[in-house]
Image: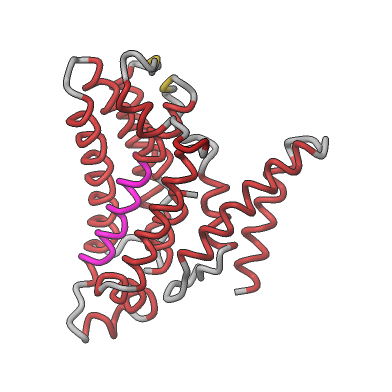
Amino acid sequence: GVIALALTFVVITGEIDLSFPSIMALGTATFCLMAKAGIPDPIALLAGFAVGALCGWINGALIARLNIPSLVITIGTSFLYRGAELILMNGTGVPLTEENYPLGHMLFNSAPFGIPIQSLWCVLIGFLLWLLLNRTRFGAHVFLVGDNPTSARLMGIDVVSVKTRAFMLVGVVAVFAGLMTSFVGYYFWPTTGEGFLLNTIASVFLGGTSVFGGTGSIVGSFVASYIIGAINAGIVSAGINAFYTQLCFGLVIVVSVVLQ
């Protein structure tokens, strides 16, 4: 859900990002390595987010400056970032115990007032990104670039900058989601992020964001992410074979795009 909210910006600009699962792993790996080396957790967290922003900048720069289709570039960078993470971690994971990472567990794996903090973060990030998309100049530029990049350029909008910042936003939020995923399981796995691609993209398209760009909604992606989660949980709790979840997500994406 958290990544779907940020990915909405990229899809509205008429692009797509398939590399965020690998960015989740690379940014979280950076945090784990720095914290393990004795660097204070806040600095290690900032370093992880910086890596996510850098990955997003690379994606955006290659796509917007060189006019290469985002589908092709982000497939390539997905392998690039995952390979870098596997080399850094040497294919091994890191235990994330509460004693060694108190700040991480407080931020990503606690339950204030009995409510899981992951849900609170999702609501807060959803609200902040709604403000960013609907109440700022950047948000207006995102819609204009997605609707007609040529017209946006003639209006004086820096199309390259808008697209690059949208990809950077996805990179930072992807690292945030990677940290949440890892701390919930008390362990960072080198395969972190795998399995998130289909549900996230399904949430964006089910939420009404057009694959052609120019239209989209943070509220739609927010609600759709909970629907996707309910489908996943419902199939399992109903006793249906879990393999049917991928079938359902695939149908959701195809039907959403066809309806648009």
Horizontal and vertical percent for residue 82? 37, 32
Residue 95 appears in which quarter of the rendering?
A: top left
- The total of numbered circles placed on residues is 0
Q: Is residue 154 above or below residue 23?
A: below
Q: Is residue 163 magenta?
A: yes
Q: Is residue 131 above or below residue 91?
A: below
In this view, the residue farthest toward the front is 113
Could you tell me which quadrant the C terminus lies in?
bottom right
In this view, the residue farthest toward the right is 239
Task: Look at the image and give the residue range highlighted in magenta.
Answer: 161-175
Q: Nearer the viewer, residue 222 or 17?
A: 222
Residue 97 appears in which quarter of the rendering?
A: top left
Q: Nearer the viewer, residue 230 or 242?
A: 230
Q: Is residue 26 left or right of residue 114?
A: left
Horizontal and vertical percent for residue 197? 51, 45
Horizontal and vertical percent for residue 6? 39, 55
Residue 67 appears in which quarter of the rendering?
A: bottom left
Q: Is residue 90 magenta?
A: no
Q: Is residue 92 visible?
A: no
Q: Is residue 255 left or right of residue 113?
A: right
Magenta segment's dominant SS is helix
Horizontal and vertical percent for residue 17? 40, 53
